[in-house]
Amino acid sequence: MITRVTDLRPLTPPAGEVPSEPAVAGRLVDEPRRALHPAWIVAGVGFVALLGAAAFRSVPSVLIEPLHDEFGWSHATISAAVSLNMLLYGLISPFAAALMDRFGIRRVVCAALVLIAAGAGLTVFMTQAWQLLMTWGLLVGIGVGSMSMPFVATITGRWFVRSRGLVTGILTAAGATGQLVFLPLVSMLAHDHGWRLPSVIVAAVALAVAPLVWLFVRDYPSDAGVRAYGAEPGSDVGVRRPVAGGAGRALRVLAAAARRPGFWLLAGGFAVCGASTNGLVGTHFVTAAHDHGMPPTTAAGLLALVGVFDVVGTIASGWLSDRVDPRYLLLGYYSLRGLSLLILPSLLGPHTQPSMWVFIIFYGLDWIATVPPTVLLCRELFGADGPIAFGWVFAAHQVGAAIAATGAGFIRDLNGSYDLAWYLAGGLCGAAAVMSILIRRPRRSLEGFA
C-alpha cells in the first residue's frame, strides 16, 4: 500500500472541521493495509488491564475469614470495607469516563493502577478496622472505579464501529477471567501463607500493568493515523476532538439523562444486577458455602468456575446484542438469574453435588451477560454521551452491590445464615426483568431488528 504525503507541515483543520482521513504527526496518510488493526491491540491491552482490575476486586471476598480470625472484626465490619470499595467503584466511574475524554485513557488508567498498588500495599501494615476502609475501601475503590465498565464503553465507542457488541462482550469477560485466574490462587495463598501475601501480589501486578497501558494504548484512532475499526471514510468516530470539562460534564450528562425514563429503568435493573452478583454472590458465596461445611478453597474454586462460564456467556451475549433486541436479552437474563438464586440455599452443603455444578454452569453463563446489551442501550439512548451515561448506570450497579454486600453481612450476623439474602435477591431479579422490557428504544434502532 503506497503512503501519500500531501504536506509535511502540521495538519491543523479549521475549528469544528473533521479531517476525512487520519492525521499522523503532521501528515495526512492513506490508511495502510495491516494484518491487525490497531483497535485490536488497544482492546487486548484493555483486556489485560480489566483482567487485573477484576482480580483486585475479587481479593477481599476470600479475606473475610482470615481477617475475622486475626483481628476479631465482625463480618459486617469487614463487609463494610468491601461495600465502600464497590460503592466507589461505581460512583467514580462516570467521572472517570469524563476524565478519559478530557485527559486521555492512558493517563487516567495509569493513575488508577498506581492508586490500586498503593491501597493493596499499605494494607499489610494495618492494625485497625478503619485502615481497612481506607486501603481496600477508599484507595482500591477509587482505582478500580477509574478503570471499570465505562472504560469498556469508551474503548468500544472510540475504536470500533464493526463488531462493537462482540468486543464489548470480550472486554467485559475480562472481569470473569480475572476472577478465574486469581481467586483460587488468592484463596490458596491466604490459607497457606496468610492474607498479607495476596495483598503484596496485587500491588505488584498493578504496577506491572501500568507500563503496558502507557506504551500500547492510544486515546483515539486518529492519534495512530487510522479510522475506527469498521468506520467509513469521512466518519468522525474515533477522531480526536477538544472536550471541555471533566467532573462538570459528568454531572451535566447525569442531569440530562435523569429526565428520560429509560435511564431510570436501566439504572434500576443494573442496581439489581450488582446486588445479585458482586454484592451477594461475589462477596459472600465463599463464606456461605463454608457455613454449610464446604472448605473455603473448594468454595473459591467453584466461584472461579463461575468466571470460566461467564467468559463464554458474556462473549455470546455481546454477539447476540449485535443481532437481537437488547431488551429481550435483559428480560431473559434477569428472569433466569432470579430463579437460580431462589434455589441456591437448597444446594449448599459440605460436598459439591451434581446440582451445584448445574447452578455454577448456569449462573456463570448469566453472571455479567447483562453488560453488553446495557452498554448498547446507553449508546442508542444517549449517543456520544453514552459512555458517561453508562457510567452513571454502572454507579447504580455498584450502589446495589454495596447495599447487598453490607446487608447480607448483617443478615448473616443476625440469623446465622444467608438464606434470606438469596431469596430477596431472587425476587429483585424478577423486578429487574420487568424494568428492562419497559425501556423504549429509538425507532431507528428498532428498524435494525425488524
Image (tube, rainbow, N blue to C red):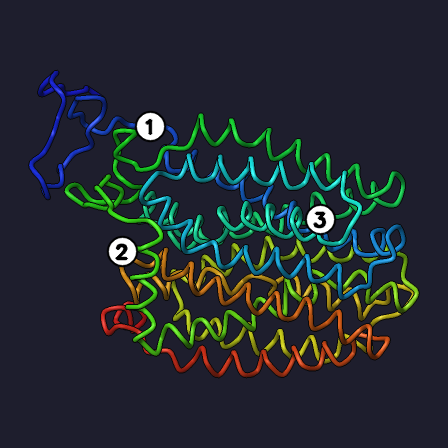
Mark 3 and mark 2 residues within 8 Å of each other at the beta carbon:
no
* Between 322 and 377, the one nearer to me in the picture: 377
The residue carrying pointer 2 sits among few (fewer than 14), some (14 to 19) or many (20 or more) residues within 10 Å by Cα, namely some
**Residue 167 visible (yes or no):** no
Q: Specify the amino acid type for callout 1.
A: Arg
Q: Specify the amino acid type for callout 3.
A: Gln
| Residue under numbered circle 3 | 131
Residue shown at 56% from the left, 73% from the top: 272
Q: Nearer the viewer, mark 1 or mark 3?
A: 3
Residue shown at 61% from the left, 70% from the top: 275
Q: Is residue 174 left or right of residue 20?
A: right
Residue shown at 60% from the left, 58% from the top: 86
Task: Name the spot of residue 152 as percent of width and height, x first.
Answer: 44, 49
Task: Name the spot of residue 103 as percent of width and height, x first.
Answer: 34, 39
Quadrant where the N terminus sits is: top left
- Spatial distance from mark 1 to mark 2, Cα to Cα? 28 Å
* Between 63 and 218, the one nearer to me in the picture: 63
Query: Which sits earlier in the primary sequence, circle 3 or circle 2?
Result: 3
Q: Which mark is residue 34?
A: 1
**Residue 189 visible (yes or no):** yes
Query: Which sits earlier in the primary sequence, circle 1 or circle 2?
Result: 1
| Residue under numbered circle 2 | 384
Q: Specify the amino acid type for callout 2.
A: Ala
Task: Name the spot of residue 404 as percent of width and height, x first.
Answer: 65, 70
Q: Secondary structure at mark 3?
A: helix
Q: Residue furthest left?
A: 14
Query: Which sits earlier in the primary sequence, circle 1 or circle 3?
Result: 1
- Spatial distance from mark 3 to mark 2, Cα to Cα? 40 Å
